[in-house]
Image (tube, rainbow, N blue to C red):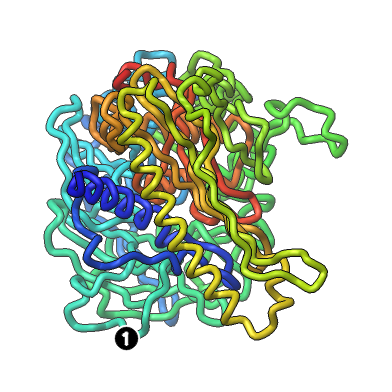
Amino acid sequence: MGMVKRCMRVGILLFMTGCIWGVSTEPESNPQEEWQVEDELRIEADIQIDADTQIEEYFQIEADSQSGQEESPVQIVKEGNIPTVRFYSEDDDFYVQCIQNLHQGNNITYADGYYYFRSQTENYSLCRTKGAGMPVEVVADQIPGSIYVREDQVYFINVSDSRTLYCVGTDGSGLKKISDFPMQELIVLEDRIYFRSVYDREYDPFYQLTEEPAEDDRYLYSMNLDGSGCELLIPKVCEEFVTDGERLYYLVFEAGWVLYKNSLDGKEEEKILHKENRIWDILPYQGDLCWVDVEQEQLVRLNEQGGEEILASDVWRFTIARGQAYVMNAEEIRRVDLTTGEERLLAEREKALENGGRNREDTWSWHVGSDNRGIFLVNGQVFAKYYESENKGVLWHILDGEAFVVFEDMEPLTAEELVLDTSLLSELIFYYPGRTDENTKQYLDMDGELHYEESFGTRKDGSTYGNFRITLPKFNSELASYEQLNQQMEILLELALEDKESFFQKINDEQDQDYCASWYREHEYSNLYIGEKYISMHYSRGGYEGGMRVWKNSIPLIFDRETGRMLHMDDLFTVEESVYMKRLTGAIYKYCEMMGWDDWNEAFDNNVLVKNFGNLRSYLTPDGIVLCYERYEIMAGASGSPTFEIPYEWFEDIFER
């Protein structure tokens, strides 16, 4: 019996320390770091605790018209600080697949009769289709970032797996991970890949970087297409980069925005431009460099004489093909002739009225600053990815004449089919979802709950401060596993009492006791659910110890009803973690699209819902499963502690019920 109790205690300790430690809280107070346990108890237990329908004279020049012509790239040589750029053919593989749509995410491309793209309707999977309205095939049940196709292989940055490099057959066969190193872009020149990533000493053998990098710093690397030979090229934080096939161009912030050029091996660096205004979307085109001046919202070209020429105004994003720039802003998409400057309006959307009098689907921007929206040129056609409606979220559209039509459609969904809000309890913009089934009362001990209260001190007026409280359920013999469940509740009580000692010690260490007048800490549970197979509850630890606001750690628990054994999410599903997490988080991302939460787009491209999901951070309700995140983990702390309840209908085919 002692060994059983010790195993249960170790399982809970592993779970609780894994959930609590590493959670970001207010700088003024970080109480979860104080709830520590003995190192010898940190052992492994039994629970292991992702226009025109055809543009004039586009890329696809017939092969027979090219016969007999030798390819002779022209070298345009520029003097001074102006870059030397090869005049490459716009049919070049790296331009069409890697450069042209680089800053819109490169998550759609064309090869051998198929469009390969990140589907907005197939749970963001890597898919392919022969055209608008044609059947969509899932190539890989992974969320792709940038996509590149060579022969019969699709190479892609796998958002589902920490943005690492994968490849899969164009028919969906042979999915393979190529590299463990995360990537932000995917530019392929011959058999070499260029990308940005976090700093890793392993790929910096000559110790080029001497300063400690920040968590969000990105540096320029290259590696072979097979994942070998990775090396750091530029030991500077690169905000973005591009290449013309012979030189690298990258943007660095150094008391302003500095554009550098360099050789492909990173050994011939030269500064070519310094701007006070932020610039982005740098694109080499026919010997010139083009970019967007963010502050002025202008498309600018650095010409052969070294002068800057404004090509178009009111520009947020752009792409270029056959002497035409395609630009977009919040309300319109235009085509600009780069020689004459003539503009043509291709499509526009009605502007939002100041009084908010129009429906969201009539007023939502084409683009709101994210790779999840943008303008793309693919196979001679203009694509845009933007918000369609509150029942469909963001969809791919294709320009047909002077109007965009849906390229990949879906059946309308209600928000409640994706994420439920069944609780009246809330914190800021998030609910603590889940209702307690009334049937649970028959399984609870009539003598009451496990309860403990104590205060650190008493004032002269008799009021208390430093209040500490614990409330946990106690089960009766109606449950076959009630003894095992109650033993685990007792262990939780013991751990909470250890937390009390650290809390009281913190108050005692404060010289000004009045500063602690509003401090408190509590351990409690809610949303107790006893189903046919599982028992679950939302156990939490929270309080206030100074700083801007109160804090709370979600520590949800799930047990097997028959045995009382504590369960991990892997025990609940018939598929591996990457599959069920993609299904669950895909519902949340689509829900956020429908709700118009634009600031979730960057979170999606970095897959923060999977990246920041801790061990045993879910609980069950009568209606679905709830995923819990701590404050700051996936959005600003002022938004609260995010929790999402996904209905069983969304994943019942892969759930152990």
Which residue carries the number 1 mark?
210
Q: Position of residue 156 (x, y in %)?
A: 27, 43
Number of labelled discs? 1
Residue 81 position (above or below residue 386): below
From this view, report whether residue 597 is shown above or below residue 651: below
- Left or right? Give the position of 471 relative to 68: right
- In depth, the one of 382 and 160 nearer the eye is 160
Residue 268 relative to residue 344: left or right: left
* Quarter of the rendering occupied by the C terminus: top left
Quadrant in the picture for residue 64: top left
Residue 634 locus on image (x, y percent): 50, 50
Q: Nearer the viewer, residue 293 or 571?
A: 571
Residue drawn at (31%, 28%), measured in percent from left and top? 481
List x then y, in percent, for residue 160: 32, 41
Q: Quadrant of the N terminus?
A: top left
Is residue 208 found left or right of 593 in the rendered image? left
Note whether residue 350 is visible: yes
Q: Position of residue 264 (x, y in %)?
A: 25, 68
Query: Which one is nearer the viewer's eye here, 243 or 43?
Result: 43
